[in-house]
Structure formats: C-alpha cells, structure tokens
Amino acid sequence: FIASAPSGHTCDIARGWRLVRVFDHFMIARDVPKTPTETIVLPDVSNAGSCQFADIRFTWEPCTNPEAVRSPRPGWIEWMDAEAFRGPVELRLPQPGDTFQPLGSPGRKLMSDLHRECRIPAQERAVMPVMADADGIIWAVGCRIAERVKCTPSTRCAIRFSATPAMRDIQ
C-alpha cells in the first residue's frame, strides 16, 4: 500500500524505525529527535567557532582568501560574504510565511516552496533550521544561501559555514 501512497506517507516497521515515501523513492528512517524551540544566537562569526542545533553540528571559520572559496556540498557547506551580515547571526526554525531570496533567484520565495524545490521530505521541513540576521534569512540549511550574502569578486573576507547532520536516516 505504501508504494501507491503520496510523498510523506509512513509505515512503522519496528522499534522506532519506519518506511517513508519521499517523492519518487523510499527511505528507512528512525524517529526524528525532539525539535528545538529556542533560537541560538551565534557568537562573533568573524572568529572560528561551532555550536549544536538539534541534531545538526554547525561550524564556521573566516577566510581572507576568497579565491579559495569552494563548496563541495551545496546546501551543507556554504561560503558567505562576512561584510553582508546585518546584526547578530542566529539559528532558528522556519516560521510560517518566512521568505527570502535564494542565490540565483530573481525574487523572494516562501521557505515552504524552497523546501519542496530542494526535495526536503515533508516531515523534515519544519525542523530544518534557517540562519538569519537582522535583515532576514541568509541560509536555508540543506538548500541555498541568500543572494545578498553571496561572495563576489569584491568580497574581502568570506566565512565558511558547515552543517553536519547526525546520521539518522538510511536512504
């Protein structure tokens, strides 16, 4: 019955494991850990650091050689122009109606639409964190950064952010 079910449909297997229909494939997953309810304000991101948000480990480090900027895992490792941040940087959960302008997009998008485009499974969309500053979302973790924080030829200092999720799913 799950083969013909819509995306997001689950079937319990045993001891906290379930079979999940995710778009056109299946995933075996453990129960998702408890969702954080608080926002984490990152310490000064101009210095290297790290923090934990739910089951994702975040690290960051500045780089004054923008030519070295490379992103081998788009969505999970991102480079941003350090001078583009406005106010403190924070990690939080997406809120209903959140929008931002993803890198390469001509306009703003709802986070819910971006998560669908990035093929984030429905049951994980509400728990995928976003990084924001005083002007709004700068990184939809697992998807894309905002157009306004991209590195350009005039970037003098970039910050490399990395998000490493705990291994909880087998695809």
Image: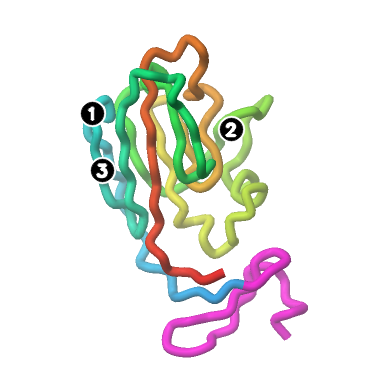
User: What residue do we see at 28% from left, 44% from top?
Assistant: 40
Q: Is residue 169 above or below residue 52?
A: below
Contact (Cβ within 8 Å) of mark 1 with mark 3: no
| Label disc, if present, on residue 102 of the rendered structure | 2
Q: Position of residue 13 (x, y in %)?
A: 53, 88
Residue numbers of the magenta segment: 1-26
- Residue positioned most to the right: 4
Task: Tell me the mark number nearer the camera, choosing from 1 and 2.
Answer: 1
Q: Which residue is mark 3?
A: 50
- Which image quadrant: the C terminus? bottom right
Q: Nearer the viewer, residue 13 or 48?
A: 48
- SS label for mark 1: loop
Give the residue type that dot 2 points to: Pro
Task: Residue type at mark 1: give it.
Answer: Asn
| Helix, strand or loop for disc 3 | strand
Q: State which tag comes first along the sequence, 2 or 3.
A: 3
Q: Vertically, is 114 above or below 21?
A: above
Name, please, the residue furthest toward the top: 154
Q: Tag 2 or tag 1, which sits nearer the N-term?
A: 1
The amino acid on which the numbered mark 3 sits, given as a three-letter code, is Ser
Q: Which mark is residue 47?
A: 1
Please report the residue visible at 39 percent of the width from the left and 52 percent of the height from the top: 164
Q: Residue at x 64, y 73 (%)?
A: 26
Note whether 12 is above or below 21 in the view shown: below
Residue 53, percent across and down?
32, 52
Instruction: Tell me the CA gap for discs 1 and 2.
Output: 25 Å
Asked where in the image residue 62 lies, by quadrant, the reply is top left
Q: CA distance from mark 2 to mark 3?
A: 24 Å
Count neighbours of disc 1 (C-alpha within 10 A) and say few if under 14, some if 14 to 19, many if 20 or more: few
> Residue 165, labelled with which disc?
none
Alpha-carbon neighbours of circle 2 within 10 Å: few (<14), some, or many (≥20)? many
